[in-house]
Image (cartoon, grey):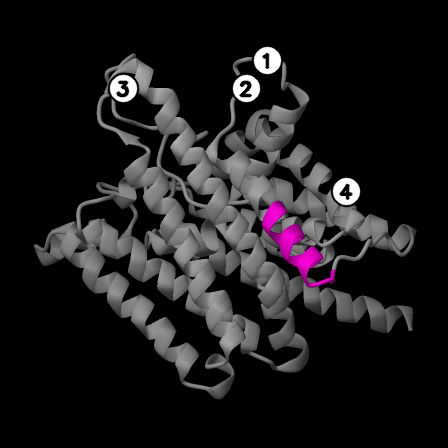
Amino acid sequence: MQESDLPALVAQVLWAAFALAVVFGAIAQRTHFCTMGAVADIVNMGDWTRMRMWLLAIGVAMLGFNAMVAAGWVQAGQSVYAGPRLIWLSNLLGGLMFGFGMVLASGCGNKMLVRIGGGSLKAVVVFVVLGFAAYATLRGITAVARVATVDTVALSLATGQDLPSLLAGPTGLAPATLALVLGGLIGGALIAFVLARPDGRTGEVWLGGLGIGAVIVGVWWVSGRLGYVAEHPLTLESTFVATNSQRMESLSFVAPIAYTLDWLILFSDTSKVLTLGIVSTVGVIVGSAVLALSMRSFRWEGFGGVDDLTLHLAGAVLMGVGGVTAMGCTVGQGLSGVSTLALGSFIALAGIIGGAVLALRWQVWRLERMA
């Protein structure tokens, strides 16, 4: 590839990622796709409908990603999730913080962007505070604390932490073969679980599950296949264009929100360029807004009082710090990361769900005490 060809390739990656994020935002607005809501529905009402939608999205993302691995298009180790260093304590603690925070803030990062598109000024405040906290945890004061404490607790593995790489040695099978088998088995089992009950066979569940899962796979392809350059004309090294991590990425909504604020604040700095994460963040808002306006469901929303504001601010900080510490959110780890079959992603996902359940129980205790 010639240096003169790079701008066109970057533009293709950014526009494709933006378009997929718009679809994500529209589907999430239409189907009320929300991990926090899914957990809350189970805890408060015993309703598994939205959880089945989320599990369907995970299953589809697993099948799609690992099919691409088997085809030789991408490798799990080329992502930020499946490296050989397993920071299990960071994944777990960060997940717990993020899960607790998303309940206080009325939704995770993805839901916050969807709510902005639907007219929520509360979500705009959460966006700014979450982004600030996330940036501080990437490069600021909380980053120093993170690196000096929880990030030091890690397991160094001989291979990548994705299940196909871990099992390749003991089984004697190629990682690509194992990716196809394990992705098919786990993803297929999740889809079978969704189909097992009538509430998993509704049109809304399938629109949300299939649509969101397919978008995750699509962004993996855009970043890992379309945006892959085997030999960068300047560095002569392989790279993935238009990503903040210089690795292949799919959707995630914590660090990208921090990078979006950074780009807006330092727009005149020519070193600050658009990336896949930034355009995806904007794309979800645009997709949600377009659908909300077309369905006449757009409504301005503000805080109900000081207590409401306090809870949302606390939730935003917990999500920003926790999301970076865990290396992702309900979408970053719970969909994109888990689709790679990385151990750290499963640990982070367990932490997020556990944190959400704890927060929901705390809310009930708090209401009872106030009564």
Residue at position x 68%, y 50% in the image: 117
The residue labelled by disc 4 is 125
Q: Secondary structure at mark 3?
A: loop
Q: Do labels 3 and 4 touch, CB within 8 Å?
A: no
Spatial distance from mark 1 to mark 2, Cα to Cα?
A: 6 Å
Residue at position x 50%, y 80% in the image: 202
Identity, as a three-letter code, of the amino acid under mark 1: Asp
Identity, as a three-letter code, of the amino acid under mark 3: His
Q: Do labels 1 and 2 touch, CB within 8 Å?
A: yes
Q: Is residue 3 above or below residue 282?
A: above
Identity, as a three-letter code, of the amino acid under mark 4: Val
> Where does the magenta region start and end?
286-297
Rendered location of residue 336, percent (x, y): 42, 51
Residue at position x 30%, y 14% in the image: 3
The residue labelled by disc 3 is 232
Q: Do labels 4 and 1 touch, CB within 8 Å?
A: no
Spatial distance from mark 3 to mark 2, Cα to Cα?
A: 20 Å
Rendered location of residue 44, percent (x, y): 68, 77
Quarter assignment of residue 73: top left
| Position of the C terminus by quadrant | bottom right
Q: Give whichever of discs 3 and 4 has the lower sequence position.
A: 4
Observer able to see residue 91? no
267 left or right of 53?
A: right
Compare residues 104 and 10 and report the one nearer the observer.
Answer: 10
The residue labelled by disc 1 is 269
Spatial distance from mark 3 to mark 4, Cα to Cα?
A: 40 Å
Q: Secondary structure at mark 1?
A: loop
The residue labelled by disc 2 is 272
Labelled disc at residue 217: none
